[in-house]
Image: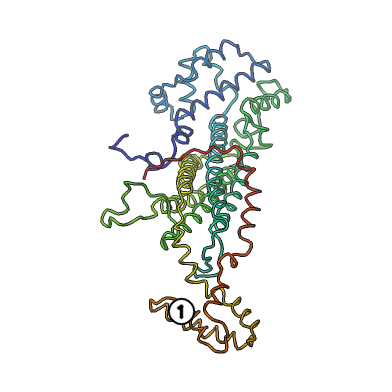
Amino acid sequence: MMTNTYQSPLASRYASKEMLALFSSDARYLTWRKLWIALAQAEMELGLPITKEQISQMEAHLEEIDYDCVAKREKQVRHDVMAHVYAFGQVAPAAAGIIHLGATSCYVTDNADLILYRQGLRYLRQGLLGVIANLADFAEEYKAMPTLGYTHYQPAQLVTVGKRATLWIQDLVADLEELNFVEEHLKFLGCRGTTGTEASFLDLFEGDEEKIDKMNARLCEIFGFSACYDVCGQTYSRKVDSRILNCLSAIAQSLYKMANDIRLLQHDRQLEEPFEKDQIGSSAMAYKRNPMRCERICSLARYLMADAANAPMTASTQWLERTLDDSANRRISMPEGFLCADALLRLAQNVTDGLHVNEKIVEKTVWEYLPFIATENLMMEAVKQGGDRQEIHEIIRRCSMAATAEMKEGRSCDLLARLAAEPAFSMTEEEMEKVLEPSAYTGRCAHQVEAYLKKVRPLLRDVKREKTEIQV
């Protein structure tokens, strides 16, 4: 690791080796060379004067990238693609004259990006499925465990721990559906010329338009794309980038919601993210167990949501058939979007794999508020025993306000005792406690969890269940 120059934390701390390799110089420029070989192969098959020997020499020296040669040549010609054409020709001299034949720079730059982005989406899919799988197991385990629900972050009705997890899962499944849609609808740019007219190939193929279509179909086949975009300028539409980063932003939004919920619940000691044996929570306060992984998720998610704004701004400002003010922005915003999404999913896999429920705290919190939650049921029981509904309602309202005031003074909830002391209420504390069974107040939570997970499980058949280690 270089210590005397800036290193992106996404590379040095957060992203996986796989995603870093995908957006490395080697991956990018090897893909360029594969594109040049594929173009030459397709052109040879369609009758252009290119030999098998030329292609074989290119293939034999595919991985011999002399970066010093590239840098020296780029400094001279001020053009990165032509510098790489030159360097490839140096190691495959027999093919030097036909490399990049008929193509413009965007043939390699844009098509390579599409190839790498597609692979990136596929890799992120596995991470997303891993989080969903962990949460599905968690939801199944705690599907029936009552816990206090909140609206406006104020105590509300009971839900279950597992039901709450399904809310996180449902958001992530929506993200999975969007990711699948984006990946399935990615197309290839193909080799379309300087303004997308394919004029150079009309010349090369002597006006045979069918050969141009066959060439692009062959390129799609080689790289596993269903088709080329129907029309284009020099580049593919930058709205494609916008669609991709919007998808990554959506994942960030869902993970932020989940991580923020966990942070709130950890504040109340109901739920805790993993905390390792020798982990230090604070440099000064040795007792602390800060939710630093969830805090990191929220922090990186904000970055990714902001990063996604780059793509629509770029897409909306492209001039006519092409302008180069997209390039510098895309070199940063697109790879970093993927690296950040990867980092988020790695963190989320780690958190959800070791999420801990403090069951006694959850139970205590439930019982603290259950008398208030059960007041409607208590009212019905009191009426059954001969009470007047309106009078009972007023008693409950008055006693609830008084019990709440006591709790605000730091004392325990005494609502049941207050109600039992009311002659018109006609129920003892013991009778009221029989009504206070927490599971009776969670509605259909357990059933909802079971029914939803039945729909989700088929998505998880091919998930790779690997333990994700992160740098704490």
Quadrant of image for the N terminus: top left
Q: Is residue 154 above or below residue 163?
A: below
| Farthest top residue in view | 53
Report the side of 324 relative to 208 (left or right).
Answer: left
Q: Does the rendering let one see residue 313?
A: no
Tell me where residue 440 sits by quadrant. bottom right
Quadrant of image for the C terminus: top left
User: Of 447 and 244, which appears nearest the observer?
Assistant: 447
Q: Is residue 421 above or below residue 273?
A: below
Residue identified by numbered label 1: 414
- At x 43% / y 52%, what residue is drawn? 273
Report the side of 143 relative to 331 (left or right).
Answer: right
x and y percentages locating residue 252 in the rendered image:
51, 50
- At x 61% / y 60%, what residue is drawn? 445
Report the side of 4 relative to 161 (left or right).
Answer: left
- The colour scheme applied to this rendered structure is rainbow
Tell me where residue 34 sits by quadrant. top right
User: Of 83 and 361, which appears nearest the observer?
Assistant: 361
Query: Callout 1: 10 Å neighbours few (<14), some, many (20+)?
Result: some
x and y percentages locating residue 459 in the rendered image:
63, 43
x and y percentages locating residue 382 in the rendered image:
61, 82
Q: Is residue 406 above or below residue 349?
A: below
* Mark 1, secondary structure of its residue: loop
x and y percentages locating residue 213 in the rendered image:
70, 27
Q: Does the rendering let one see residue 372?
A: yes
Tell me where residue 239 sits by quadrant. top right
